[in-house]
Amino acid sequence: MIEQSLFLIKPNAVMQGHVGHIISMLEDHGFSILKMKLFRFDEELSRIFYAEHIGKEFFNRLQSFMCSGDTVALLLEREDAIHHLRELNGDVLPEKRQPGTIRALYGAGITENGVHSSDSLDSAKREIEVIFGA
Ligand code: CMP
């Protein structure tokens, strides 16, 4: 099934100059870019975007990291996009990241993990609305 997913290149990867290579990796894996923008999360937007994580012990770390610099957001589309993107991203845990995945290349730790993509069709719909509007 053709799916859409929200993809973020997070502040550590933007600051370190990896936007171009990450977008090339996405294109090489057959993703079409439908929308793209550069912006900075503020406290309010990060609370809305990461609402499911409010109250977790890592939330404040996640929030201050996401507000620390610019983010690039892409609306991506391809067959089975959600699953393929999560494979290409690599695991949230550094020790489980497969070589060649984006997080193995550009993730510094659990929080500063370089990229985000939606984990389900429902989250994709919500996240796309939050970042790009309905
Ligand atoms: P992301 O895919 O954007 O989804 C939620 C984010 O929270 C995740 O990537 C990490 O940046 C962060 N995160 C998840 N689990 C932890 C954790 N245990 N400690 C710190 N940050 C986490």
Image (cartoon, rainbow, N blue to C red):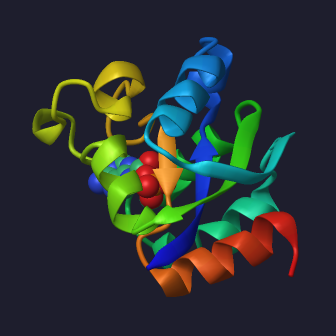
Quadrant containing the C terminus is bottom right
Residue 69 versus residue 107: which sits nearer the camera?
107
- Who's the residue at 66% across and 72% down the image? 127
Residue 50 versus residue 74: which sits nearer the camera?
74
**Up-down: is 84 above or below 113?**
below
Residue 40 as seen in the image, left or right of residue 19: right
- Residue 105 locus on image (x, y percent): 34, 20
Name, please, the residue furthest toward the left.
95
Name, please, the residue furthest toward the bottom.
122
- Who's the residue at 39% across and 69% down the image? 80
- Residue 61 locus on image (x, y percent): 50, 46
**Up-down: is 36 above or below 78?**
above
Examine the image and state in which quarter residue 13 appears.
Answer: top right
**Up-down: is 129 above or below 110?**
below
Quadrant containing the N terminus is bottom left
Residue 52 as seen in the image, left or right of residue 9: left
- Residue 63 locus on image (x, y percent): 61, 51
- Who's the residue at 66% across and 24% down the image? 14
Residue 87 as seen in the image, left or right of residue 11: left
| Picture mark count | 0
Q: Is residue 74 visible?
A: yes
Residue 77 versus residue 59: which sits nearer the camera?
77
- Residue 93 locus on image (x, y percent): 21, 44
Q: Is residue 12 visible?
A: no
Examine the image and state in which quarter residue 69 appears.
Answer: top right
